[in-house]
Image (cartoon, rainbow, N blue to C red):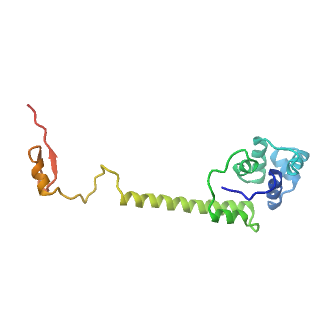
Amino acid sequence: MALPKVGSIGEYIREQRTQAKISMRQLAAAAGVSNPYLSQIERGLRKPSAEILNQIAKGLHISAQALYVQAGLIEDRETPSDVVTAIRADTHLTERQRQVLIDIYESFRKEKRAGDEQTSQKAHPRSGSVTNDEQPLPEELLAALEPYAASTDNGTVNQETKEG
């Protein structure tokens, strides 16, 4: 999930905090860090650890992964769809509204993928699977197999074992 790029992690945190309408003091208290330390992070004077980013994410009610990606601690693994990019770029939505829309969109995509897989499995059943609409073997093949197998009434072949 890609995020809109801003100059630094501090700017991104400030942007998320202002969109959430949380004061710096409130976020510092919620994240368990000092107000001056949070101010230094937002101004780009300090680079927070992963643990501090996790606490700030909890205080902002956003994904810690979003902050880790923004800070460069982890790579963004999946290229986002245009829909997710548009949702993230919409400044008229709160972070919570964005996340809910993305969650709903991703659940629809997951449902579609599962449906596509089921359709694919029906169109291309695995080898060795038995279906109810199996055709009987052609007569010439049955004749060739006759010394080795016994034929049933419906034209399918059963293997005989000879003891002795």
Residue at the far bottom in the pictured view:
92
Q: Residue at x 78, y 50 (%)?
A: 59
- Corner quadrant of residue 6: bottom right
**Camera-nearest residue between 34 and 77:** 77
Horizontal relation, residue 126 to residue 7: left or right: left
Horizontal relation, residue 124 to residue 137: left or right: right
- Corner quadrant of residue 131: bottom left
Horizontal relation, residue 131 to residue 139: left or right: right
Where is residue 30 drawn, in percent x and y? Answer: 81, 48
Q: Quadrant of the C terminus?
A: top left
Q: Is residue 106 above or below residue 32?
A: below
Q: How many marks?
A: 0
Residue at the far top in the pictured view:
164
Where is residue 147 drawn, in percent x and y? Answer: 8, 44
Residue at the far right in the pictured view:
36
Where is residue 157 drawn, in percent x and y? Answer: 15, 49
**Camera-nearest residue between 71 and 103:** 71
Q: Residue at x 91, y 46 (%)?
A: 36
- Corner quadrant of residue 23: bottom right
Q: Is residue 147 above or below residue 79?
A: above
Where is residue 154 drawn, in percent x and y? Answer: 14, 56
Horizontal relation, residue 109 to residue 135: left or right: right
Q: Quadrant of the N terminus?
A: bottom right
